[in-house]
Amino acid sequence: MTATPPDMPAGDETFVGSGPLRLWTQRFGDPGDPTILLVMGTSTQGIGWPDELLHALVGSGRQVIRFDHRDTGRSDCVDFAANPYALADLAADAAAVLDGHGVDAAHVVGTSLGAAIGQWLAVHRASRVRTLTAMAATPMGNHAGPAWARAMAGQPAAAGELPPPTARFLGHVTASAAAPRTTHDERVEADVRTWRVLNGDVLPFDEAAARRFVERCHARAGNISAALNHDLAGRRFADDRRAALSAVAAPTLVIHGSADPLFPPAHGEALAAQIPGARLEVIPGMGHHPFFAPGLTPRIADSIIRHTT
């Protein structure tokens, strides 16, 4: 494993423009090094990429950029009813982050929604993507809504359909919708419960780390509830999302957990099968969000470093 520098300086925080929006970004490392753009998942702030991962990537000779999506963290929020957006707009934000830092092309590393953004860029803005690492992902053209609806109704999956989330995850969604969120403590507890479920049922869950992360997210968010707009954006499908992934030319690594409760392993297998030459790495016991499972972050860092070398 690549050693991590013990004294890496704090990242440079900058706001960049994406149309009328300002997006918070943070850059680490030497601007002359190859760039890794880290793209977080649904409703999750850029600080979800842990410092341990950043240290390893910078120590391997990469410049690393992470950022807050619109409607999260310190980035601008949107009136979704008046100005709805979709995956293509979130991908445009990611490209704007590269523009704001003077980067023509980057190694794009995305998880969950961030991996869908990476797929969109690799298809529609191929010149911006040197390599793609898609973690905890499903093909961007997979419309999961019908499978979820059938599973929630206790109906079997349709033929050829990728599997729905686990019963435990769906039960959590139902219980979470009814849970009180009127106080700060209730909102924090609800978020910690969600991260616990996303961790999966196999590997240990570092609840203390998750709680610190949640508290930090609540403290730095301009409007914590605006992040729910990502769910609305994710349900919007157009032809750009249905574009064939066979068009992806960037070398692609698909990292997937064997215990992912949101996207069971068949999703990662389908994604890797649709991208020419993609390599699939299944990590035993990993859930949907790996960074609260002790020991997984160094392994993921090593996989990213090997793929981007």
Image (spheres, rainbow, N blue to C red):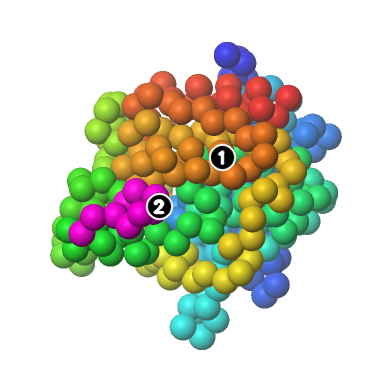
- Residue indicated by mark 1: 273
Q: Secondary structure at mark 1?
A: helix
Indicate yes or no whether the magenta region holds residue 102: no
Residue located 41% across and 33% down the image: 257
Residue located 57% across and 71% down the image: 238
Residue located 49% across and 71% down the image: 236
Q: Which mark is residue 156?
A: none
Within 10 Å of disc 1 (Cα), the crowding (few <14, some 14-19, many 20+) is some
Quadrant in which the C terminus is drawn: top right
Give the magenta-colored segment's residue range. Answer: 155-164
Image-quadrant location for residue 64: top right
Kind of residue at disc 2: Gly
Report x, y in % for residue 73: 49, 58
- Residue placed most toward the observer, 115 or 35: 115
Q: Earlier in the sequence, mark 1 or mark 2?
A: 2
Residue located 70% across and 29% down the image: 308
Query: Does residue 60 show up?
Result: yes
- Residue placed most toward the observer, 27 or 123: 123
- Residue placed most toward the observer, 220 or 17: 17
Q: From what the image shows, is residue 80 above or below residue 258?
A: below
Kind of residue at disc 1: Ala
